[in-house]
Amino acid sequence: MTDIYLIRHGETLSNQLGAYQGHSDSPLTDNGHRQASCLVNYFQGITLQQIYCSDLGRAVTTATPLADAKKLPLNLCARLREISYDYLDGQPKAQLTIKDKQKLQRLFSAELNYRIGNGETLAEVQTRLFKKLNEIESEHSGQSIAVMTHGLSIVMLIKKVLHIPVDAPRMFNIHNASVCHLTFKSGKWILQSIERNDGKVTLSKTDS
């Protein structure tokens, strides 16, 4: 059995400002650094053999304390990035035009094949991430691996694992520094739990 722990990066300044970060970047807040430290405590009793990480700075900063504590290198990967919003990357919600808000509404309603400018569709994000997840499992079968990535990215992976259509409404949240535990056994993925950084379970599904 392979264990994968999907982790969302800690809180950033853009999170506080309500900006769509996408492929842009933003520093962690003091709370985000605290969340990164709490992840070290979360994994204290969990043996990890690998740590994979989005190459965006907010993910790297969040993952570094855990990598240092486990004495493991960070395997950086651009395919673990958040969705690209093209020219809206990094734009605060309060500064968006009506037309831009309409574009985002179409994207988040999961209108199939809809993208903003040269950005990505939700289906493309899901395909990119799920392919990488399967590659990680194949290369490290039977191990326990942490994967530091992003909120919407994790949502798309969870939808795939639970066989929820891309365009179905999202009925769960992925908070900053949340840990989503997946296992791969007998050729299938199972969602074991989604836990907040404070250890409070927000969603749980077991192989029963």
Image (tube, rainbow, N blue to C red):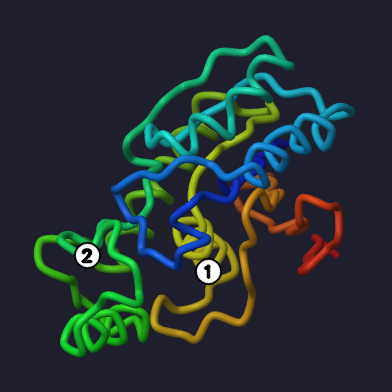
Amino acid type, callout 2: Leu
Q: Nearer the viewer, residue 43 or 3?
A: 43
Residue plotted at (38% across, 59% down): 126
Q: Give the quarter of the figure containing the N terminus.
A: top right
Residue 137 position by quadrant:
top right
Q: Position of residue 191 (x, y in %)?
A: 69, 58
Viewer-closest of 80 and 20: 20
Q: Secondary structure at mark 2?
A: helix
The residue at which mark 1 appears reads as: 159
- In the image: residue 86, left or right of residue 51: left
First reached walking from the N terminus: tag 2 or tag 1: 2
Mark 1 secondary-structure assignment: helix
Residue 156: percent from left, percent from top: 46, 64
Residue at 81% in and 62% down: 206
Mark 1 residue type: Lys
Residue 97: mark in rendering: none
Q: Name the residue beneath numbered marker 2.
A: 88
Identity of the residue furthest to the right in this view: 45
Q: How many marks?
A: 2
84 above or below 52?
Answer: below
How far is disc 2 from disc 1 in space, using C-alphas?
24 Å
Q: Dot 2, how many residues are within 10 Å of its Cα: few (below 14), some (14-19), or many (20+)?
A: many
In the shown orientation, is residue 86 left or right of residue 63? left
Residue depicted at x 41% and y 25%: 76
x and y, in percent, of residue 48 in the image: 72, 23
Residue 23 relative to residue 201: left or right: left
Residue at the (45%, 68%) spot, across then down: 18
**Residue 161 on image: x %, y %:** 56, 62
Residue placed farthest to the left in the image?
A: 117
The local crowd at label 1, few if under 14, some if 14 to 19, many if 20 or more residues have their Cα within 10 Å, is some
Front residue (pair 12, 119): 12
Indicate which label's residue lies in the foreground, 2 or 1.
2
